[in-house]
Amino acid sequence: MSLRYALLALLTVEPMTGYDLSKRFESSVAYVWHAPDSQIYPELRRMERDGLLTGEEIPWGPNSRKTQYRITAAGIAALREWMNTPLEYSRERDPVHLKAAYLELADPKAARAHMQAHIDYHTLRREQWAAMINELRTGTNVMLSKRLAKTPESDRQRTTAYKIFTYEGLIARAQTEIEWAQRGLKLIDSLDEAP
Amino acid sequence: MSLRYALLALLTVEPMTGYDLSKRFESSVAYVWHAPDSQIYPELRRMERDGLLTGEEIPWGPNSRKTQYRITAAGIAALREWMNTPLEYSRERDPVHLKAAYLELADPKAARAHMQAHIDYHTLRREQWAAMINELRTGTNVMLSKRLAKTPESDRQRTTAYKIFTYEGLIARAQTEIEWAQRGLKLIDSLDEAP
DNA sequence: CGTCTCATGTAAGGAGTTACATGATTTA
DNA sequence: TAAATCATGTAACTCCTTACATGAGACG
């Protein structure tokens, strides 16, 4: 259900086509929520059916059309309601730690590769999120700039602050994962050399 | 697919019924991987069909039977292969941080409740995992004791060490989440009082 | 005129959730 | 003998993934 609200949040900035939205999901939003276009297009139609969006056929080139979706008052209300509703935490399901718990069954070489892959993955994420924070701080993030232009002056500070806070949390988590995997590498070495 | 390997890992200790396994998923394994019995029973049948397990009908009470599953050589091989295969990291999909990114749309009261719920959730997890580590260290964890009894002496140390390492990682992550949400509470306060 | 971008789907299947459903056995 | 535990499912549904599919417009 989160996909629906991620789409609503993006559409509060400006009307967009499914294609526009799917591009946003590849860049900015993708750092928090991923969705392929095969999921976005049907969901937009369902949201229009549910009255959260209106779709307008606008001309594109001489012989073609595209559908631009605009959030409705009901859509804004639904988004606000979701924002005020407590989140339900889903049950633990963590493939990385499941595998880590049985690392003695892996070859030491493979065990090291797991830890190194974990470090690499979270290092990359950490850099992407840091770059995002930099964009947010310097006012060079396109979506944030558009959003702030529509936001009353009194709310601009919090709008920016919460986005930075979000990415700081993701960076902190990535950092913790990196440190854990580094300890893992040391542990594998120590268990491997001294049997 | 991880469910399959979680089941295989449990069945390396001893043969079990679907019910036994579903109990394990409610206690020990559930701290890393959750699965309801409606998922476990069909998966066990598929695994038997695929030759990873053999199911044996054993009597239970005077008029009843139960199916006990035993891992096969092919099952052990499949588990080892999975352990030596790099993990594919799935795309970001994080409802907590998605919501955090738009916290300005929530009432300050609801925003605080989100952060507090995050703190509460991860505090509980942290305690459960700490209790698990205590069990692992003191030799009072049933599954680990049974596993160690079947493990050659030379491998016992790593078997225990990797499990402790796994839960330490989960605790570290929970701690990071708690600290982030605490910073969130302060941020909400500061944005709320000084507009 | 070819390639890249814009634009929008369908279809099959895997994984997981929730609800519904039943009945035997053990234990207090 | 009632309650808790053991035992095993089915069925409908949501969400997501992967693969397949098509075509117009813009740009060089």
Image (spheres, coloured by chain):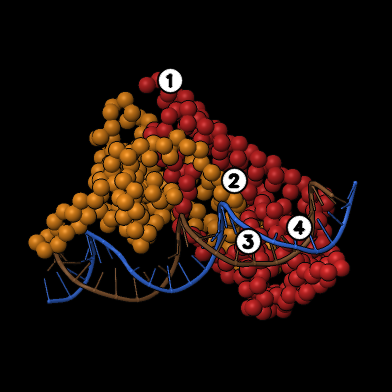
Chain colours: A red, B orange, C brown, D blue
How far apart are the alpha carbons under marks 4 and 3? 31 Å
Q: Which marked residue is nearer to the observer: mark 1 or mark 3?
A: 3
How far apart are the alpha carbons under marks 1 and 2? 31 Å
Q: Amino acid at mark 4?
A: Thr
Chain letter of mark 3 equals A
**Residue A38, labelled with which disc?**
3
Residue at horizontal 81 percent and vertical 72 percent from the top: A58
Question: Which is more N-terminal, label 2 or label 4?
Answer: 4
State whether residue B38 appears in this view: yes
How far apart are the alpha carbons under marks 1 and 3? 49 Å
Front-most of A104 and B133?
Answer: A104
Question: Which is more N-terminal, label 3 or label 4?
Answer: 3
In which quadrant is the C terminus of chain B drawn? bottom right
Q: Which residue is mark 2?
A: A173
Image spot of residue A186 (x, y percent): 50, 27
Q: Amino acid at mark 1?
A: Glu
Chain letter of mark 4 equals A
Question: Which is more N-terminal, label 3 or label 1?
Answer: 3
CA neighbours of label 3 inside 10 A, class few (<14), some (14 to 19), many (20+): few
Total labels: the figure holds: 4
Q: Is A136 left or right of A37, judged from the image as shown?
A: right
Q: Which residue is mark 1?
A: A193
Q: Is B3 left or right of A183, judged from the image as shown?
A: left
Question: Which is more N-terminal, label 3 or label 2?
Answer: 3
CA neighbours of label 2 inside 10 A, class few (<14), some (14 to 19), many (20+): many
Q: Which residue is mark 4?
A: A160
Image spot of residue B38 (x, y percent): 35, 62
How far apart are the alpha carbons under marks 2 and 3? 30 Å
Q: Secondary structure at mark 3?
A: helix
How far apart are the alpha carbons under marks 4 and 1? 50 Å
